[in-house]
């Protein structure tokens, strides 16, 4: 009964806007921050800002690859020539322009490499958003646990204080021994200590959350949300999680990039030729020379070794992709099982807490009528209090694991607005 009254008081104390669910194309819940504020907090996190810089880096790298590695070179030489046999000096000069030319196929491969680099950076940005969202969700519920514990400890202290007042009255009236007053007072002191510890833990959780997400304000009050059971089939959840898993998409892009790099290194075994034009003037302009230059390096062992290394790196990237796929599948099953188990555990602990509360209430009635032992009442009340706290924590666990499942399936917050999608 007391717990229901406290819940009603908390809800009535909240402003009307706090009770309105915000729909931003994602799941809106009373125990989650608004989706628009979440998006802003995620974008400002250093991990996400670093990944966004990576996208800009790869965009510039794509432009570099499209432009190619070769540049036009200009040469100029001037000299003075003296013929001693006729005692005559003449001026001579030579001007040349040359540029290596990428062989057919290399430019297209470079363009592919640039495009897949931007794609991989986009997936890395999505992965950074996802990991930061996981951190936000974890620390949000960590704060809720500590805040809920403080609420429960506050209610417990008030309960033990009321009981202590009744004990003192009974001792003063001669209806109870002095020992009951001492036991009751000790219990009040223990409750005060537990409340102080809960307040410290809540302050630490608030500070940690504020340091990671300074733009996201914690609510003044907690709105308890009833956990929902996980629906849909396990296979359906697996497919959705794999479809939207950025880490797996990054691995696939990395494998594709490694394959393209290996192909580009294989093509580089045939060196690019250099084509140039030469203009020269000799004997003070009496002789004019126009020439065409063509040169090509001989392919050596270094180019062959680079090609073999690129092939090996492509094989390694493929194996890493397979490893990450296996790990992501295991993690998807684990997340789903945790969500289902946490919901079942919450239901069990809620039922246990209700039964223990009822038992403590009956023992208190018997004690007030002089038919029960005070020590038994205290033991029952402590068990009921801990069971109620355990049920409250289990409720948060059930909600967090379900939201984590929705987050991994990209059904909680929008995380794909700036990243390409990937399908398994």
Image: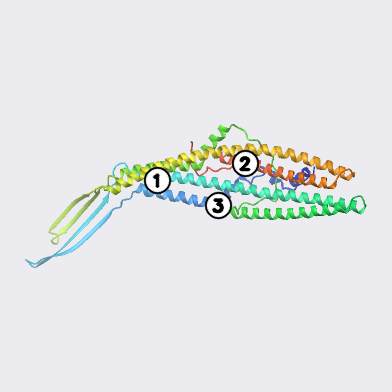
Find residue 343 and report its horizontal and vertical position in percent. 66, 38
Q: Which residue is label 3 attached to?
A: 45
**Can you tell which mark lies on residue 194?**
none
- Residue in the image at 74% along x and 39% along y: 352
Q: Does the rendering let one see residue 244? A: no
Q: Between residues 231 and 38, which one lies in front from this camera angle?
A: 231
Disc with the residue nearer the chain's start (2 vs 3):
3
Describe the element under mark 2 as helix, strand or loop. helix
Task: First in sequence, mark 2 or 1: give its number.
Answer: 1
- x and y percentages locating residue 310 in the rendered image: 36, 45
Residue 204, percent across and down? Answer: 65, 55
The answer to which of marks 3 and 1 sits earlier in the sequence is: 3
Which of labels 2 and 1 is toward the front?
2
Residue at which label 1 appears: 114
Residue, far left:
85
Decide: few, some or many residues near mark 3? Use Cα within 10 Å; few <14, some 14-19, many ≥20.
Answer: some
As measured in the structure, the alpha-carbon distance from the residue carrying label 2 to the one carrying label 3 is 23 Å
Element at badge 1?
A: helix
Marks 2 and 1 sit apart, C-alpha to C-alpha, by: 39 Å
Question: Could you tell me which residue is drawn at 78 percent across and 55 percent down?
Answer: 189
Within 10 Å of disc 1 (Cα), the crowding (few <14, some 14-19, many 20+) is many
Q: Quadrant of the N terminus?
A: top right
The alpha-carbon separation of the residues under discs 3 and 1 comes to: 27 Å
The image shows residue 260 at horizontal and vertical percentages of 37, 42
Left or right: 205 in relation to 51: right
Task: Identify the residue under disc 2.
Answer: 401
Tell whether 350 sits left or right of 287: right
């Amino acid at each position: 009964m007391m717990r229901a009254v406290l819940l009603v008081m908390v809800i009535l104390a909240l402003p009307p806007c706090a009770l309105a669910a915000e729909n931003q194309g994602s799941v809106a819940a009373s125990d989650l921050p608004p989706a628009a504020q979440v998006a802003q907090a995620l974008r400002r996190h250093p991990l996400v800002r670093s990944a966004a810089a990576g996208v800009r880096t790869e965009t510039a790298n794509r432009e570099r690859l499209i432009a190619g590695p070769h540049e036009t070179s200009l040469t100029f030489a001037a000299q003075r020539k003296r013929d001693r046999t006729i005692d005559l000096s003449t001026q001579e000069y030579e001007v040349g322009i040359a540029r290596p030319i990428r062989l057919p196929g290399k430019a297209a491969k470079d363009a592919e490499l640039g495009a897949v680099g931007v794609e991989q950076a986009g997936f890395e940005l999505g992965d950074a958003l996802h990991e930061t969202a996981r951190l936000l969700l974890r620390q949000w519920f960590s704060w809720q646990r500590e805040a809920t514990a403080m609420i429960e400890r506050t209610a417990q202290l008030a309960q033990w204080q009321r009981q202590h007042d009744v004990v003192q009255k009974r001792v003063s009236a001669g209806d109870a021994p002095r020992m009951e007053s001492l036991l009751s007072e000790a219990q009040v002191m223990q409750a005060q200590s537990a409340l102080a510890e809960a307040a410290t833990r809540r302050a630490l959780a608030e500070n940690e959350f504020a340091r990671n997400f300074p733009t996201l304000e914690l609510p003044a009050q907690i709105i308890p949300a009833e956990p929902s059971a996980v629906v849909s089939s396990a296979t359906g959840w697996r497919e959705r999680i794999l479809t939207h898993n950025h880490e797996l998409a990054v691995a696939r892009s990395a494998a594709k990039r490694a394959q393209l790099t290996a192909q580009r290194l294989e093509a580089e075994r045939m060196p690019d030729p250099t084509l140039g034009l030469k203009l020269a003037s000799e004997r003070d302009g009496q002789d004019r020379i126009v020439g065409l230059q063509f040169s090509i390096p001989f392919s050596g062992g270094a180019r062959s070794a680079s090609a073999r290394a690129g092939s090996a790196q492509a094989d390694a990237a493929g194996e890493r992709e397979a490893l990450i796929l296996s790990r992501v599948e295991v993690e998807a099953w684990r997340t789903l099982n945790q969500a289902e188990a946490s919901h079942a555990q919450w239901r069990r602990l809620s039922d246990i807490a209700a039964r223990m509360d009822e038992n403590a209430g009956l023992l208190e009635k018997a004690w007030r009528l002089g038919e029960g032992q005070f020590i038994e009442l205290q033991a029952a009340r402590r068990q009921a209090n801990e069971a109620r706290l355990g049920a409250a924590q289990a409720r948060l666990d059930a909600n967090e694991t379900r939201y984590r499942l929705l987050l991994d399936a990209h059904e909680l917050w929008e995380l794909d607005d700036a990243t390409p999608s990937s399908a398994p």
